[in-house]
């Protein structure tokens, strides 16, 4: 049987009067058997393509029988068919009658009695999805009536009311403005006498409506709903319906974050209710956490509601007490004492971790002046308690609030640090660990004041804690805390303690616990880094231990130990200097070279440590040529200029350098380096680290691409390059969104452009969309910054210094927009006409840049982007001519030569590819081009490129629109401008065009009685005298052949006359090429 006929029979059976075949098909779609499910999917897809109308209607009819076994699957499939975001979306293709019936059936099914909660939710979602497509054009008027009746009618069953309210919540932005009696209906739903579900759905709808309203005044009309909203929440909890209550709390948190001012009038009651939930011991942890999250979110909403929460000073005390109680949820796990794993959270529960995070956020949000008095009231009872968990909680609290309270804590250093140091002698090891942890955190957050003022008590305490051999985790943490202390410490402070500290650390290196050894290595590295040349005294004692670990810690379980020894050696080497380190450096570098040549597993930490070690070793290498250090890596010698950048930035720069220098040879390291550097794109503590990480991204892609192309990628193909691109490109775009420095933002765009070039068509549509959305954000942010500066310039105190600063800042914005242009140009060149839908979206952002109030650079870049579109999309770009060509014609008169060049180049492109669409502009284009060419200073150095591009554009009008011009006037004018000598790319194109015209004996080019021949020959002579600069080899060969033809075909008198017009040098050049 013909397959098409068989398909028709299948469709007739499934969509016929008998429901059994459709029921069977829907059953198979949910079948665990792959073959049956695959066959059913093929059938369904075929029906969707060939019979969408009856398929949609049959699925909808099934929903009228909610107890039918196939109803749940029918609801899922119907939603796909009518959801605009679904690949299966067919609604626009349905017949109008089908669309109407389908809408009616959906509403009828939604109000069916006996609808299960699951199907009701699916139906509600389907209705909302279709409505988002129809409501903007007013194409579903019945929906508002249906929802209103479902919510307002006293006879509506609670399930229908709940479903209608949930649909309203999804569609609030479309429906709220026109929904009758909305305030009263929401109040009634929030106070429903019998159904908690309706009350929670009312809460959902109320929050969505409030968020959808455009102005604060509109939102304020609903403020009196808040008591009912809070009652609905409380009643859910009282009924034991914590699932619904948690949904409601999540919505309230969203409201607190987005519209905190809405809560202002009812703030004391709302916050008190939330704290009551947080304090209730009988509730689930998840419920209590959400209540805490609500209050912390409100505290953090300072930008939207500055000062609002300070009206409630007592809430901080209650919240702080609740959160500290959550810190007691920690267990004394044996794994913690074993100290085999690096994980320090053994025994810590979800509540404990959540509480830590909340204390940190709360302290940052409200500041030390508010938090410290509360902490001072609570901490003494905890720190003096008999139960170890309470003492532990007190110390963890100090660690967590230190960052937010740093300024105030610094004023009370003795008191805060004294409380912590007293706990170094606590009988419980976990409390001692927490005390050490607090000292480490305080050293980071309160440094360098802590180091300067209290080194005499902190360092001896840490050294003493290293003696706790019965608790290796405590020992290791004490050693690690030396790192925190050292980072903010001057060498002269640390040096007097080094004898004791180094002696203890050397003992720890001989410990049987790997965790302790690793902690000791970290401490030695940081001590050496901080004390610099003062560490030379200990070098001979320390280095043998370090080398022994590097060479002997070879089994898999010791990989991190070996990696840290490598880090420690390189930092010690940097600290003591090349003279002291030279002999050991050779030995260590040999070990690194052998490691690099060996096979290492993908997750081996030694890889990234090795690269950082190389960076440091390179700084202390043995070459002293002009401050450049060199090492041999593989078969390449790499030179590294020593730098004053900090260690992390140096290591990042080195990684970039390796990738650039080794090209495809860097392939084995790409994965490790990418996972190390991509997170550093958002390393906001150090600009140089971000810059180096940004620069490395395209180098990694280039290395991978070359390795794949040259067959040196260990069997990997383009799929690997795509995988790497999928990792790097979105990370660059995300970093671009969040980058606070305009200069680095420009660098990110530059790297993004290079990465797009490397990735090419491996980028899929979704990634291109992500890039374009990112570029839109960059353009908007840059424009906003310019507007703010304009406002600053209008201030009464504005002076010449401010003016200079503004000019520099705007130049950085120009650089950003320049890089935006390069990125978009690359996308256009890569994807050509496939990029045009994105260009349509971008035009809204670009066309304003052509305005007279914009900078020359903004206008130039926008014109260049259009030039790229016109050049690479050719006929498909004609539809943009009406928008952009008038601006190009106007820009021909710009005082800025770069703008003029971009404009006249674009006119040439449009003349070449625009066909009849360009013809109406020919006259004005000629006039504008003549003005550029004939300007008295046209051939000045600044203007020469615009001149050459104008001549090229004139030639294209001659070539493609000769029937629209007076060729006998225009072509000689064009010829008189030749040869071109500045824009060497355009010169080659134009001179080839001239040859082609002469090959066809173009009458306007030759002129009456060959009157232009002397100019033609002299132009050829100049081109040939310039060597390869002004013509391709092919064009030069054509010129020689044409001259030889003229030599044989022209009368001797004409030839002699022509020859006599040439300069002696030109005559010699022509004689040379014609006789060779």
Image (cartoon, helix red, strand yellow):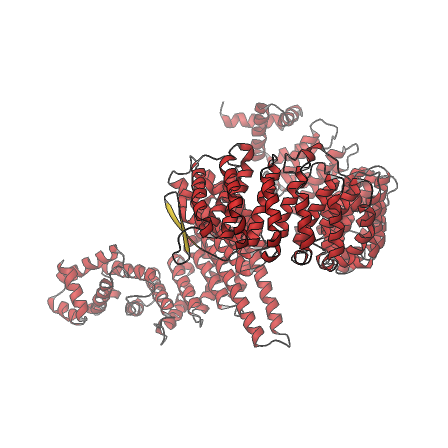
> Where is the C terminus found, in terms of image quarters?
bottom left
Point out the residue furthest to the left here. 1052
Q: Is residue 719 above or below residue 615?
A: above
Position of 17 with respect to 871 (left or right) is right
Residue that sits furthest to the right in the current view: 193
From where the camera sits, is residue 734 visible?
Answer: no
Q: Nearer the viewer, residue 583 or 1067?
A: 583
Which residue is painted at 22% across and 62% down in the image? 1024
In front: 182, or 640? 640
Rendered location of residue 1019, percent (x, y): 24, 66
Q: How many marks?
A: 0
Residue closer to the observer: 366 or 408: 408
How far across and how far down the image is residue 525, in percent? 56, 47
Residue 822 showing in the rendered view: yes
Q: Residue at x 85, y 44 (%)?
A: 234
Q: Position of residue 101 (x, y in %)?
A: 68, 39
Q: Nearer the viewer, residue 889 or 914?
A: 889
Please tell me whether residue 853 is drawn above or below residue 670 in the rendered image: below
Residue 671 percent location from the top left of the image: 50, 41
- Residue 50: image quadrant is top right
Image height of 1042 relative to 523, above or below: below
- 828 relative to 410 in the view: left or right: left
């Amino acid at each position: 049987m013909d397959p098409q006929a068989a398909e028709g029979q299948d469709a007739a059976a499934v969509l016929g009067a008998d429901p059994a075949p459709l029921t069977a098909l829907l059953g198979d779609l949910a079948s665990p058997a792959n073959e049956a499910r695959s066959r059913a999917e093929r059938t369904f897809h075929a029906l969707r393509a060939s019979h969408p109308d009856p398929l949609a209607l049959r699925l909808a009819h099934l929903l009228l029988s909610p107890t039918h076994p196939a109803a749940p699957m029918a609801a899922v499939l119907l939603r796909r068919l009518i959801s605009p975001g679904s690949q299966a979306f067919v609604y626009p293709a349905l017949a109008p009658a089908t669309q109407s019936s389908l809408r009616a059936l959906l509403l009828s099914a939604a109000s069916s009695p006996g609808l299960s909660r699951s199907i009701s939710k699916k139906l509600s979602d389907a209705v909302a999805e279709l409505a988002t497509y129809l409501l903007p054009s007013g194409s579903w008027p019945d929906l508002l009536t249906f929802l209103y009746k479902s919510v307002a009618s006293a006879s509506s069953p609670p399930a229908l009311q709940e479903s209608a309210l949930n649909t309203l919540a999804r569609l609030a932005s479309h429906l709220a403005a026109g929904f009758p009696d909305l305030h009263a209906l929401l109040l009634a739903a929030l106070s429903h006498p019998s159904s908690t579900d309706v009350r929670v759905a009312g809460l959902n709808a109320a929050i969505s409506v409030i968020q959808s309203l455009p102005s604060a005044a509109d939102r304020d009309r609903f403020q009196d709903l808040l008591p009912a909203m809070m009652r609905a929440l409380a009643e859910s909890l009282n009924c034991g319906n914590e699932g619904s209550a948690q949904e409601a709390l999540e919505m309230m948190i969203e409201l607190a974050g987005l519209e905190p001012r809405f809560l202002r009038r009812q703030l004391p009651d709302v916050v008190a209710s939330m704290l009551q939930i947080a304090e209730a011991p009988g509730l689930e942890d998840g419920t209590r956490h959400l209540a805490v999250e609500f209050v912390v979110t409100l505290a953090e909403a300072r930008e939207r509601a500055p000062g609002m929460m300070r009206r409630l000073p007592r809430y901080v005390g209650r919240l702080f007490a609740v959160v500290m109680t959550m810190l007691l949820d920690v267990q004394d796990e044996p794994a913690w004492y074993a100290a085999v794993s690096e994980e320090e959270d053994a025994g810590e529960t979800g509540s404990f971790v959540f509480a830590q995070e909340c204390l940190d956020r709360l302290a940052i949000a409200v500041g030390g002046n508010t938090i410290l008095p509360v902490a001072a009231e609570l901490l003494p009872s905890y720190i003096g308690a008999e139960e170890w968990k309470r003492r532990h909680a007190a110390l963890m609290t100090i660690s967590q609030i230190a960052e937010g309270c740093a300024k105030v804590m610094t004023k009370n250093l003795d008191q805060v640090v004294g409380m912590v140091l007293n706990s170094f002698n606590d009988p419980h090891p976990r409390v001692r660990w927490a005390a050490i942890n607090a000292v480490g955190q305080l050293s980071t957050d309160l440094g360098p004041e802590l180091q300067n003022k209290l080194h005499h008590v902190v360092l001896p305490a840490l050294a003493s804690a290293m003696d706790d051999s019965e608790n290796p985790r405590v020992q290791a943490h004490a050693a690690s805390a030396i790192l925190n202390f050292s980072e903010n410490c001057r060498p002269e402070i640390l040096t007097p303690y080094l004898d004791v500290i180094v002696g203890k650390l050397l003992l720890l290196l001989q410990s049987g616990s790997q965790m302790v050894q690793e902690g000791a290595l970290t401490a030695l590295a940081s001590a050496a880094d901080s004390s610099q040349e003062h560490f030379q005294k200990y070098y001979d004692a320390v280095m043998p231990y370090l080398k022994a670990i590097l060479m002997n810690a070879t089994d898999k379980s010791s990989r991190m130990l070996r990696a840290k020894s490598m880090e420690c050696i390189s930092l010690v080497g940097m600290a003591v200097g090349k003279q002291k380190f030279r002999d050991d450096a050779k030995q260590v570098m040999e070990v690194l070279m052998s490691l690099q040549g060996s096979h290492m597993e993908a997750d081996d930490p030694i890889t990234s440590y090795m690269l950082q070690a190389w960076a440091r070793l390179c700084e202390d290498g043995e070459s002293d040529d002009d401050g450049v250090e060199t090492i041999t890596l593989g078969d390449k010698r790499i030179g590294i200029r020593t730098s004053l950048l900090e260690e992390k930035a140096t290591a990042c720069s080195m990684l970039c350098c390796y990738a650039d220098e080794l090209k495809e040879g860097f392939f084995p390291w790409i994965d490790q380096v990418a996972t190390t550097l991509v997170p550093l794109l958002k390393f906001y503590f150090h600009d140089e680290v971000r810059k180096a990480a940004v620069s490395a991204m395209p180098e990694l892609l280039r290395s991978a691409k070359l390795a794949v192309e040259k067959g040196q990628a260990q069997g990997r193909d383009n799929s690997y390059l795509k995988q790497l691109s999928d990792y790097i490109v979105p990370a660059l775009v995300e970093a671009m969104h969040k980058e606070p420095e305009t200069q680095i933002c420009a660098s990110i765009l530059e790297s993004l452009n290079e990465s797009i070039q490397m990735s090419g068509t491996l980028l899929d549509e979704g990634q291109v969309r992500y890039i374009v959305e990112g570029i839109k954000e960059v353009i908007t942010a840059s424009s906003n910054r310019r507007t703010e500066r304009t406002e600053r310039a209008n201030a009464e105190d504005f002076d010449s210094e401010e003016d200079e600063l503004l000019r520099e800042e705007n130049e950085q914005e120009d650089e950003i927009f320049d890089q935006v242009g390069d990125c978009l140009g690359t996308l256009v060149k890569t994807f050509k006409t496939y990029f045009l839908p994105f260009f349509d979206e971008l035009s809204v952002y670009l066309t304003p840049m052509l305005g007279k109030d914009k900078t020359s650079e903004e206008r130039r870049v926008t014109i260049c982007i259009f030039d790229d579109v016109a050049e690479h999309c050719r006929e498909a770009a004609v539809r943009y001519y009406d928008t952009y060509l008038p601006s190009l014609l106007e820009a021909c008169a710009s005082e800025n030569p770069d703008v003029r060049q971009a404009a006249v180049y674009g006119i040439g492109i449009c003349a070449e590819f625009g066909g009849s669409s360009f013809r109406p502009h020919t006259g004005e284009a000629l006039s504008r081009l003549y003005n550029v060419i004939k300007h008295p200073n046209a051939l000045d150095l600044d203007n020469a490129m615009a001149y050459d591009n104008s001549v090229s554009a004139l030639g294209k009008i001659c070539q493609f629109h000769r029937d629209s011009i007076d060729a006998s006037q225009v072509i000689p004018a064009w010829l008189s401008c030749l040869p071109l000598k500045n824009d060497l790319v355009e010169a080659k194109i134009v001179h080839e065009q001239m040859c082609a015209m002469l090959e066809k004996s173009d009458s306007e080019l030759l002129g009456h009685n060959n009157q232009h021949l002397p100019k033609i020959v002299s132009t050829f002579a100049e081109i040939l005298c310039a060597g390869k600069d002004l013509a391709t080899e092919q064009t030069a060969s054509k010129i020689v052949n044409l001259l030889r033809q003229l030599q044989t075909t022209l009368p001797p008198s004409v030839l002699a006359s022509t020859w006599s017009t040439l300069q002696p040098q030109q005559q010699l050049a022509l004689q040379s090429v014609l006789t060779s």
